[in-house]
């Protein structure tokens, strides 16, 4: 029944066999993860969560009930009260009573207050007092303060003898458009949006390095902890196992991003449909109310952002994927090395710290890079390979980076990840067979230098 | 001539870890189609030696040959290794998992499927094929592990404690398969602490202690070598007179038997004398069990070692 003809196998070239094995590992790592509930849930929930995070404040603002407040104004000068216009939050009432009797009247009332305005409105400091049994909410205080300041400002200008019509002419809107001069001519840019998209990309890279890196680490620890690894490495080389795992999980990450990009386009389309439908169905009265000066600026801004985000910058997309892959290979191979050096996930914390610190530094100095994308700190961070995946994207999004700096940064990143894969493979090879003791950094050094 | 007969040849292999020597100049030869027992206390260097045969580790010095050929990538396909610490992916289904490992060994997928089905049926595990491994009992996982080891039809089988965790029925099932494989020409290296299994199954053994081979021979000659002048006598008569017959010490005695060690007389001479005095129902040369030999040798070599250390 058994014939051990193991030695008379058909000849298959070693390279195809090897590729075949790495491919098998990639396939397993990819398929088991993509089919898992965790992947499906996170792929759906992350954009939903982000969308909620953006939309929720708007919705909350829309549905929040306005606190109604009745305010008695003691105004001996008689100049402020006529200008205080009541609205849905405040009703201002004149009163002839004095402060003490008002105080008695208000006892137990929650939605009433007293505003005491001094007679002399010419001083450098004007002290207005507000009393009530309840504290003002932050929103109410800001609103009230704004109203009063506006009114007092008007009064002060009137005191100087400038007539009202002239005053109207002082109002204006500022629009600062920025443009970039290039060979093709002038390009319209929006500094804010460029900075934002740079920041978002850097943040995405940071988050995915941390999350996918820990996936790789957990995968290695799991294989080591349940001892599959010994069976695996009598069939495949440790290096193939490690690189297969890294590529498989990376492919999963790219799949996730691809799904998100598709979902984003879809949601933006739906959002645009709803928005246009909504604006067509608004009745004229409402429209008039919306189209005050402020909301005009606001909607203009939104439209601007939508178009900017819509127009895909393919150059930037290419760099995003380059730095994503480069950074991922660099950081995930280091995570794999750490995973191989410990017996349990909980032991990994101490060893993983030196990996997480260089990941966090560019996030900490990100605002500095945003403020001065051509400064020395920004230039260094965008070239130094441990920082460049995040820092360079921020620069690329906001300014024209000299080509030699880009090239240097890319080459350094490639060299560094090749180096880190090599070093990690050496730690991994020894680490996966070591049980029982926590490896120190010194020992890791030993493993790197130790030959086969 | 002799070379051809040896399936596996280990020549002067040494492996040093950073802090200690795990295998020190070990040479072994294992002939084709035999079951070879690798014995030794924990930490003696067995696992390191096995890992070098399976190409998980590389020797610092020395070489390993299979059929006269130095170990190569292609030998992966003809070795089946079941490590002492068993390991499977807990969430992966039985069938999927077996196919994955067989494909990693280099089998085409169709053949892997076919082999897996056959072996699952053979070990009465077919109905579990779509269950995640983590849901199976320990014994069942053990059987899956065994299938993993043998289903790519290796010609060299390395089993580390293959019966651990198995009930008697399944132990017998696995034992029968190992013997069946032996009959078909498979060479097996068998590492265990359970001596009765070694006595039962192995053709030849090597005892390793402190990174070195301290004994290598086939079981019969090992036993002969360590045989002492100890006999077991069974009789219905009173055996207290034994002391008067010859110069001996009674090691053990019971209702109707005695175990004695002869001092200055051979067994044959003793038997002749004995027959004149009592009716005996049984007279047996008591061979030492492997267990006894094992313990004796290991403690001896430990003694030697500590003496050496004192001298140093």
Image (cartoon, rainbow, N blue to C red):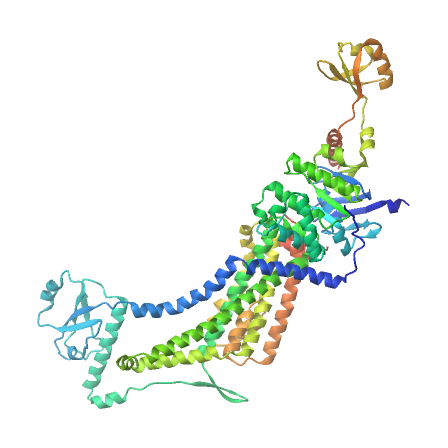
Taking depth in this image into account, of A342 and B97 the one nearest to the observer is B97
- Residue B73 percent across, percent down from the top left: 76, 56
- Residue A328 percent across, percent down from the top left: 58, 65
In the drawing, does residue B95 fall left or right of residue A96? right
Taking depth in this image into account, of A400 and B269 the one nearest to the observer is B269
Quarter the N terminus of chain A occupies: top right
Residue at 58%, 64% in the rendered image = A250
Residue at 54%, 89% in the rendered image = A184
Using the rendered image of the protein, determine whether residue A94 is visible from the camera's viewpoint.
yes
Taking depth in this image into account, of B188 and B84 the one nearest to the observer is B188
Taking depth in this image into account, of B188 and B299 the one nearest to the observer is B188
Q: Is residue B155 above or below residue A216?
A: above
> How many labels, in total?
0
- Residue A140 percent across, percent down from the top left: 25, 69
Q: Quadrant of residue B234?
A: top right
- Residue B8 percent across, percent down from the top left: 81, 46
Using the rendered image of the protein, determine whether residue A446 is visible from the camera's viewpoint.
no
Q: Quadrant of residue A426?
A: bottom right
Quarter the C terminus of chain A occupies: bottom right
Q: Residue furthest right?
A: B1
In the drawing, does residue A78 fall left or right of residue A5? left
In the drawing, does residue A35 fall left or right of residue A420? left
Q: Is residue B113 above or below residue A329?
A: above
């Amino acid at each position: 029944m058994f014939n051990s003809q193991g030695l008379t196998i058909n000849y298959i070239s070693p390279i195809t066999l090897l590729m075949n094995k790495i491919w098998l590992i990639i396939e397993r790592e990819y398929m088991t993860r993509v089919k898992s509930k965790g992947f499906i849930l996170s792929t759906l929930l992350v954009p939903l969560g982000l969308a909620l995070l953006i939309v929720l404040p708007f919705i909350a603002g829309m549905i929040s009930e306005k606190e109604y407040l009745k305010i008695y104004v003691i105004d001996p000068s008689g100049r402020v009260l006529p200008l205080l216009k009541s609205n849905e939050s405040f009703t201002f009432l004149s009163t002839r009573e004095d402060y003490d009797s008002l105080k008695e009247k208000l006892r137990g009332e929650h939605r009433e207050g007293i505003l005491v305005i001094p007679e002399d409105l010419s001083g450098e400091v004007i002290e207005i007092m507000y009393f009530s049994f309840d504290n003002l909410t932050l929103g109410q205080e800001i609103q009230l303060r704004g109203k009063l300041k506006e009114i007092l400002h008007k009064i002060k200008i009137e005191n100087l003898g400038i007539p009202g019509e002239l005053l109207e002419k002082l109002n204006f809107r500022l629009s600062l458009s920025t443009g970039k001069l290039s060979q093709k001519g002038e390009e319209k840019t929006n500094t804010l949006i460029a900075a934002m998209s740079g920041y978002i990309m850097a943040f995405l890279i940071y988050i995915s390095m941390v999350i996918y890196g820990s996936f790789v680490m957990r995968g290695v620890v799991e294989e080591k902890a349940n001892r599959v690894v010994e069976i695996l490495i009598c069939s495949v080389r440790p290096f193939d196992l490690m690189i297969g795992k890294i590529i498989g999980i990376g492919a999963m990450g790219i799949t996730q991003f691809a799904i998100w990009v598709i979902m984003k386009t879809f949601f933006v389309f739906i959002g645009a449909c709803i928005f246009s439908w909504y604006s067509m169905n608004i009745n004229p009265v409402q429209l008039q109310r919306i189209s005050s000066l402020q909301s005009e600026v606001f909607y203009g801004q939104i439209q601007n952002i939508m178009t900017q985000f819509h127009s895909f910058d393919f150059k930037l997309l290419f760099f995003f994927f380059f730095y994503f892959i480069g950074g991922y290979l660099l950081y995930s191979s280091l995570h794999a090395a750490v995973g191989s050096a410990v017996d349990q996930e909980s032991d990994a914390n101490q060893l993983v710290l030196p990996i997480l610190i260089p990941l966090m530094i560019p996030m900490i100095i990100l605002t500095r890079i945003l403020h001065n994308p051509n400064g020395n700190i920004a230039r260094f961070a965008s070239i130094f390979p441990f920082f460049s995946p995040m820092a360079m994207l921020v620069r690329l999004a906001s300014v024209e980076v000299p080509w030699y700096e880009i090239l240097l940064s890319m080459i350094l990143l490639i060299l560094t990840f090749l180096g880190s894969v090599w070093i990690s493979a050496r730690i991994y090879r020894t680490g996966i067979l070591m049980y029982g003791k926590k490896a120190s950094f010194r020992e890791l050094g030993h493993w790197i230098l130790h030959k086969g | 001539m002799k070379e051809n007969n040896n399936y596996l040849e280990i020549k002067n292999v040494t492996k040093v870890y950073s802090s200690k020597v795990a295998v020190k100049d070990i040479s072994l030869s294992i002939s084709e189609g035999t079951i070879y027992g690798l014995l030794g206390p924990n930490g003696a260097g067995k696992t390191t030696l096995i890992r070098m045969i399976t190409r998980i580790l590389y020797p610092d010095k020395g070489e390993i040959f299979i059929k006269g050929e130095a170990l190569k990538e292609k030998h992966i396909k003809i070795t089946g290794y079941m490590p002492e610490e068993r390991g499977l992916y807990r969430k992966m289904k039985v069938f999927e998992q077996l196919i994955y490992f067989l494909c990693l060994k280099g089998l085409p997928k169709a053949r892997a499927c076919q082999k897996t089905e056959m072996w699952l049926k053979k070990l009465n595990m077919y109905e579990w094929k779509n269950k995640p491994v983590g849901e199976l009992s320990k014994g069942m996982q053990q059987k899956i592990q065994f299938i993993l080891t043998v289903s790519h039809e290796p010609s060299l089988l390395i089993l580390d404690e293959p019966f651990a965790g198995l009930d008697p029925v399944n132990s017998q099932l696995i034992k029968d398969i190992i013997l069946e494989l032996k009959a078909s020409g498979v060479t097996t290296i068998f590492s265990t602490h359970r001596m009765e299994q070694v006595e039962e199954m192995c053709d030849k053994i090597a005892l390793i202690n402190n990174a070195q081979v301290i004994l290598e021979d086939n079981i019969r000659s090992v036993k002969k070598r360590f045989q002492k002048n100890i006999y077991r006598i069974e009789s219905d008569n009173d055996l207290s007179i034994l002391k008067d017959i010859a110069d001996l010490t009674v090691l053990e005695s019971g209702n109707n038997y005695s175990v004695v060690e002869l001092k200055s007389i051979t067994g044959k001479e003793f038997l002749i004398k004995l027959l004149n005095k009592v009716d005996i129902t049984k007279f047996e040369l008591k061979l030492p069990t492997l267990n006894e030999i094992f313990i004796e040798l290991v403690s001896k070599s430990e003694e030697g070692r500590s003496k050496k250390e004192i001298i140093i």
